[in-house]
Image (tube, rainbow, N blue to C red):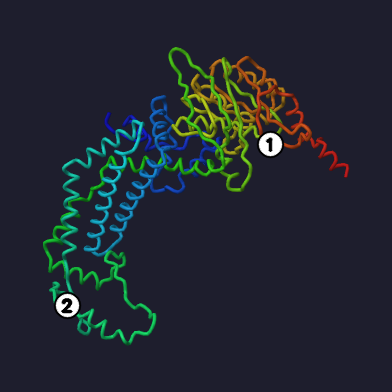
Amino acid sequence: MSFISILFNEKTKQENAQHAELPTFFVDLNLDQIVDKITEHYPEYELKPFFYFPLSNLDEVLFRQEVFHDLENITLYEHIGYFAERISEVRKYLKLVDKLYYKRQKEIWFLYAVEVYCDAVKKFSENLSEAQMNSRGLRTFQDYLTNYISSSEFKLLTEEIKRLKTGLENVKYRIIIRDNSFTVQNYEPGIDYSEEIEKTFQKFKQGAVKDYLVKYNSVSQDMNHIEAQILDFVAQLNPDVFLKLENFNSSNKDFIDETISVFDREIHFYISYFEHIKKFKSGRLKFCHPVILESSPQGTCKEIFLNEGFDLALAQKLNESGGQIICNDFYLEDKERVIVVTGPNQGGKTTFARMFGQLHYLASLGCPVPGSEAKLFLFDNIFTQFERSEKVENLRGKLEDDLTRIHYILDKATTRSIIIMNEIFNSTTIEDVSFLSAQIMNKILELDLICVWVTFIDELASFDEKTVSMTSRIVPDNPAMRTFKIIRRQADGLAYALAIAEKYKLTYCSIKERIK
C-alpha cells in the first residue's frame, strides 16, 4: 500500500476535501463554533475544509480512528509534534527569505531553512522507525519517509549542505577601518596580543565592571547596508564558495517534498483536535472511539447508544466560565428509530438534540467523541429543522416557511439520513401542530431513518413502536429547577400546559407578581 494521505485513502476525496464548504446544518448544531475553536490556533494550515468533509464509508472512518489510536501514545505524539514544529520553523525561514532585501543574506537564510528541513525529516524517520504503530496511515508514511531519505536526491541535498557549510565556516576575513572608510581582506594568521594586553591592564581592574562587549549575531535578520557591503566584498574575495551558495539557492527552490508538505498540513487535523479535547479530559470528562454502524444490502442495524455524552460547544463555554457540564445518555434498540424529547422550557432539550447531531458528525470524521462509550450510525446526510425567526425578504409566513423547509428535507432524506428537529410549527394552533406533526412522523417512520424531535406534542412520544419518549428531568420538590438531564420515560403531559401558562402569565410566579 503506497502512501496517499494521512486523512484519506483515496486521492479523489483528498482533492475534493480541499474545496469543502460549511454544511448547512452546522449553525443549528453549533458545529461551526466547535470547528472555530479547534482550528483557531492553526490558521496557517487551513484545516476547516477537512472538518467540513464527512466520510461516507466505514473503512474511511476506521482509517482515521487507527491514527487517533496511535497518537494516544505520548512518545509518538511528541515526536510528531516536534517534527511539526521544525517544519513550521522552515516555513518561517522561507517567509523571512521573501522579506529580506540583501541577496547574500537571503541566500544564507535559505541554506539554514534547507538544513533544518533535512535534519527534521531524518530525525522523524528515525523516531517513526522505533515507534509502535498500528495505523495504516502512519505505517505507510513511515515507509514513504524511509524511501525518501534513502533516495539519491535527498542524499545529494544533505551532502551539498555539508560542503557549503564547511566552505562558509572556512571563510575568514578582517576589516581595516581608517577614518570614514574600510577595507576588507582575507584573514592572514598573525601574532595575537590579546592575552598579553589583558595581563598588562589587569592591575587597573576594580571589582565587577560593566561588560561593553557587543555580541555579534552572524545570522541577524537586521543586516544594514554597511554589513551587506562587507559581505559583498567577502564574496568577491571568496568567489567559489559564494557561487556554490548562489547555485544551491537557484537549483533547490522546491526542496520541500510535496507529500511531506501535505502530511505536515493534514497531521494538524489530528493535532488540533487532540489539543482541543485535552482541556476537557483534564476536567475528567470522557472521550471515546465509537463503534460505527453502516448500512448494508442485508439490512441496517440502527441500535445506537451513548453513555456520558455532552454538547461540546456548550462545554467550551462552560469550561471557560467555570460552569458545570451535564452528561446525558441515550439508546435505540430493535425497531426504535425516533427519539421524541419533551419537557419544560430551559430543561436541556435543545442541547440534547444538538449533542446527538454533533456526536454523529464528529464520528463521521473519525474523531473521538464526547462520552465514555458509544455506538453511532454512519449517515449519508444530516438534516436539521430548528426554530428560525421570520424573514421579510422571503415573502413567506412563518408556517409556510417551516413547511417549505420540512418538505425539502423529507424529499431529500433517505433511510441512511439523520433528521434533527427542534420546536417546529410554533406559529400555529395546537390542532394544526398536532395534525402536521402526525403527517411528518408517518413519513419519517416510512423512511425508517434515525430522528431526534424536540416538541411540546406529547402524543408523538407514543406514536408508534419505533418512537421513544425522553423527557427533561426537573427537581421533584421544586418543578422550577432544571437538572438538564434527559431521561428515557413517558411524557407526563405537563410541558405544553406549562408553556401555555407562561405565555398567558398564569404560572404561580406570574400570578403572585400580579397580586403584588
**Rendered residue at 50%/17% (across/down):** 301
Give the number of the disc on residue 466: none
- Taking the image as shown, residue 388 lies to the left or right of residue 175, namely right
* 10 Å crowding of disc 2: few (<14), some (14-19), many (20+): few
| Three-letter code for the amino acid on which mark 1 is drawn | Gln
Which quadrant would the N terminus be assigned to in this image?
A: top left
Residue 13 occupies quadrant: top left
- Taking the image as shown, residue 4 lies to the left or right of residue 166, namely right
x and y, in percent, of residue 368 in the image: 48, 34
Residue 323 occupies quadrant: top right
Which quadrant would the C terminus be assigned to in this image?
A: top right
**Rendered residue at 46%/37% (across/down):** 22
Rendered view: 360 above or below 123: above
Q: Nearer the viewer, residue 419 or 429?
A: 419
Q: Residue 15: in sight, yes or no? A: no
Rendered view: 273 above or below 193: above
Rendered view: 53 above or below 227: above
Which residue lies most toward the top here?
A: 298
Identify the secondary structure beneath mark 2. strand
| Three-letter code for the amino acid on which mark 2 is drawn | Thr
Residue labelled with disc 2: 183
x and y, in percent, of residue 156 in the image: 16, 47
Distance of label 2 from label 1 (alpha carbons): 81 Å
- Taking the image as shown, residue 85 lies to the left or right of residue 400, namely left
Residue labelled with disc 1: 346
